[in-house]
């Protein structure tokens, strides 16, 4: 049964069918949310909030946009809100997390050839996480949706309501920024390690 | 298409979401454009690199679904549905009531049906008289006219006979 049909049944009273919607989307929504929070519990709470909000607003769903686009729009907006609130609460911990830095330096010390290859080989997920986390918001959302969640620029445009051309530009600039910061961080780390 | 236009679709190209025609054209362009080819390689490289950081299995907790289902108000739309059914029932009752009223109104004259029949007969008779009256008058006049002609015919005959007798 198509998502849109399930939604029409739910708003007519067959509310148990919402479990089908959860089954279909919980993994991807949770994964997207996790790339913002990097915390299992926070991601769990946010995902739950997103699905509750989705359920409570099912009546306002217009079938002009696909249901999944609508759902991800709710999810991404909630994640952006969460990031903003989080930023107000804490200063970015990117350069402060000494434990993680030690981890990064240890892995860089063992690197074989290029910094990128070294990082890939050492599987330093904390490192990547921090770089993405520190990106300006307009780049972070498109980077997460494109590189981690495999949405196409057109789909990201539909979700965010930003023109596709702008998404392509943000992806291009976001990638360059990401690359620059990765290189800066790796070079800095290398120097520190060598000293 | 110029290089910039291809460049605006390179992420879409890597996603495999371009149409067959666009994808084919982009692939052909990449064979001749180093800059775009490098860009595509960078995108692919970054994709692989970032994905390599996703080693931890990002799976939702087992009880996420039950938690959501327990938190939502399952009666939310059921109440609305029930209300709409109730409204439908009210409409049905109203229609039945309206039908009954119409039935009473249409049945009421049947008690005087003989009277209605008599009235109708009288009216019909009156109309027939009104139509027949001028016709019978015309008929009478025609009869009188015919009689006079006959009389005149008799007089003429007598005059002719007298004339013949005089000769």
Image (cartoon, coloured by chain):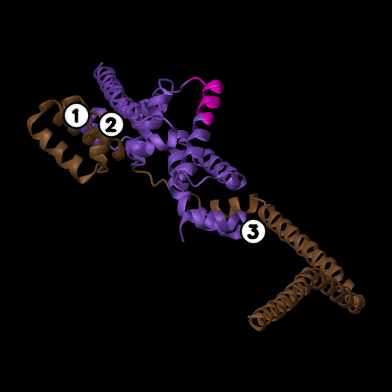
Say which quadrant the N terminus of chain B sits in: top left
Which is closer to the viewer, label 3 or label 1? 3
Left or right of A30 in this view: A106: left
Whether A189 is drawn above or below B117: the answer is above
The answer to whether any part of residue A88 appears in the image is yes
Residue occupying the far front of the picture: B167
* Residue behind mark 1: B39
Colour applied to chain A:
purple
In this view, the residue in front, B146 or B9, is: B146
- Crowding near the residue tagged with mark 1, few <14, some 14–19, many ≥20 C-alpha atoms within 10 Å: some
On the same chain, marks 2 and 3? The answer is yes
**Label 3 chain ID:** A
Q: Residue at x 30, y 35 (%)?
A: B50
| Sequence-earlier tag: 2 or 3 | 3
Colour applied to chain B:
brown
* Residue behind mark 3: A13
The answer to whether the residues at label 2 and label 3 have Cβ atoms under 8 Å apart is no
Q: CA distance from mark 3 to mark 1?
A: 51 Å
Residue B29 spot, x, y in % from top left: 12, 33
The answer to whether any part of residue A111 appears in the image is no
**Label 2 chain ID:** A
Which is closer to the viewer, label 2 or label 3? 3
Left or right of B162 in this view: B23: left
Quarter of the image holding residue B150? bottom right
Q: Judge whether residue A89 is colored magenta.
A: yes
- Crowding near the residue tagged with mark 2, few <14, some 14–19, many ≥20 C-alpha atoms within 10 Å: some
Q: Which residues are magenta?
A: A81-91
């Amino acid at each position: 049964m198509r998502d849109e049909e399930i939604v029409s049944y739910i708003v007519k009273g067959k509310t148990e069918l919402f479990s089908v919607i959860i089954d279909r989307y919980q993994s991807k929504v949770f994964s997207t949310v996790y790339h913002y929070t990097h915390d299992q519990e926070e991601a769990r709470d946010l995902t739950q909030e997103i699905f509750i909000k989705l359920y409570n607003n099912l009546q306002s769903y217009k079938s002009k946009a696909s249901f999944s686009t609508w759902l991800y729009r709710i999810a991404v907006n909630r994640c952006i809100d969460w990031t903003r609130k989080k930023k107000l609460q804490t200063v970015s911990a990117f350069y402060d997390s000494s434990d993680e830095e030690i981890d990064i330096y240890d892995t860089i010390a063992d690197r074989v050839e290029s910094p990128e290859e070294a990082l890939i080989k050492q599987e330093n997920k904390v490192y990547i996480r921090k770089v993405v986390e520190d990106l300006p918001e307009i780049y972070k959302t498109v980077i997460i949706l494109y590189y981690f969640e495999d949405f196409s620029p057109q789909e990201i445009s539909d979700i965010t309501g930003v023109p596709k051309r702008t998404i392509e530009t943000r992806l291009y600039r976001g990638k360059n920024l990401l690359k620059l910061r990765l290189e800066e961080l790796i070079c800095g780390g290398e120097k520190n390690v060598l000293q | 298409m110029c290089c910039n236009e291809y460049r605006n679709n390179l992420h879409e190209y890597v996603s495999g979401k371009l149409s067959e025609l666009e994808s084919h054209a982009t692939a052909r362009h990449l064979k001749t454009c180093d800059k775009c080819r490098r860009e595509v390689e960078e995108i692919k490289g970054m994709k692989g690199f970032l994905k390599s950081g996703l080693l931890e299995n990002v799976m939702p907790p087992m009880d996420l679904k039950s938690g959501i289902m327990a938190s939502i108000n399952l009666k939310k739309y059921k109440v609305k549905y029930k209300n709409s059914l109730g409204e439908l029932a009210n409409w049905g009752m109203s229609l039945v009531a309206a039908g009954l009223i119409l039935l009473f109104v249409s049945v009421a004259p049947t008690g005087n049906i003989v009277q209605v029949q008599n009235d109708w007969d009288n009216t019909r008779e009156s109309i027939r008289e009104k139509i027949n009256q001028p016709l019978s008058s015309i008929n009478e006049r025609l009869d009188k006219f015919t009689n006079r002609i006959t009389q005149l015919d008799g007089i003429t005959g007598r005059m002719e006979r007298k004339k013949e007798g005089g000769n």
